[in-house]
Amino acid sequence: DSGVTQTPKHLITATGQRVTLRCSPRSGDLSVYWYQQSLDQGLQFLIQYYNGEERAKGNILERFSAQQFPDLHSELNLSSLELGDSALYFCASSEGSNYNEQFFGPGTRLTVL
Amino acid sequence: GQQLNQSPQSMFIQEGEDVSMNCTSSSIFNTWLWYKQDPGEGPVLLIALYKAGELTSNGRLTAQFGITRKDSFLNISASIPSDVGIYFCAGIPGGYQKVTFGTGTKLQVIP
């Protein structure tokens, strides 16, 4: 158990819908990272928040957005969902703002029908 | 998105055998990380490397940071069935730059 929690574990929805994925970092970690893992694209970095502020952006679509709240939990919002958005979405956290030694959550499996 | 090249892509080995896999890039990295992912789970950090030439062990696992800083290697000695999973390398150019993950090596261990 990494100490990072993600909810829900599974999510099934339809195209065009909007969903919110939630992540709670390890106690004491200030950074939260979001990743998308699909069969054909591997593990792709989406976005990082550090202590409530956006720190870095990766391959995140404009239809996706995220935020980190004062209690340091984070939410990833996915809107206008397409079939290709079906993937595992992982949250990771680290103590500092650099990428070393991130700890990953169990992931949310999103299926868009 | 950019990814590191890992090889082999997959491998089947007998229990007890040693395993080697590597990760190569056209770019220089200042940090290399190796993760293992079990089916349906998130990646778990195995080893972190911070200096060119560094050799670090974690039990039966040994990883090396290549001298050119463009590659890294992971060895698993005396494999056991619970070594099954996907192994990912990850490289960080430096400072607060973004991490890039490898394409993964899927390991199957035959008892």
Image (cartoon, rainbow, N blue to C red):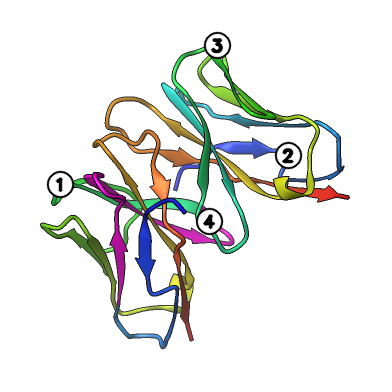
Q: Amino acid at mark 2?
A: Pro
Q: Secondary structure at mark 2?
A: loop
Residue at mark 3: chain: B
Pointer 1: what residue? A51
Of the numbered discs 2 and 3, the one sitting upstream in the chain is 2
Q: CA distance from mark 1 to mark 4?
A: 29 Å
Q: Secondary structure at mark 1?
A: loop
Foreground disc of the pair 1, 2:
1
Q: Amino acid at mark 3?
A: Gly
> What residue appears at the point 61 percent right and 55 percent down from the top-left corner?
B38
**Residue A24 x %, y %:** 29, 59
Q: CA distance from mark 1 to mark 2?
A: 38 Å
Q: Main secondary structure of the magenta part?
A: strand
Marks 1 & 2 on one chain: no
Residue at mark 2: chain: B
**Residue range highlighted in magenta:** A20-42
Q: CA distance from mark 4 to mark 2?
A: 17 Å
Q: CA distance from mark 1 to mark 3?
A: 34 Å
Foreground disc of the pair 1, 3:
1
On screen, B103 above or below A66? Answer: above
Q: Which mark is residue B8?
A: 2
Q: CA distance from mark 4 to mark 3?
A: 30 Å
Pointer 3: what residue? B53
> What residue appears at the point 58 percent right and 59 percent down from the top-left corner?
A40
Q: Amino acid at mark 1?
A: Asn
The foreground one among B44 and A1 is A1
Of the numbered discs 1 and 4, the one sitting upstream in the chain is 4
B35 relative to B16 in the view: left or right: left
Q: Please tell me how crowded label 4 is: few (under 14), some (14-19), or many (20+) other residues with Cα within 10 Å.
A: few
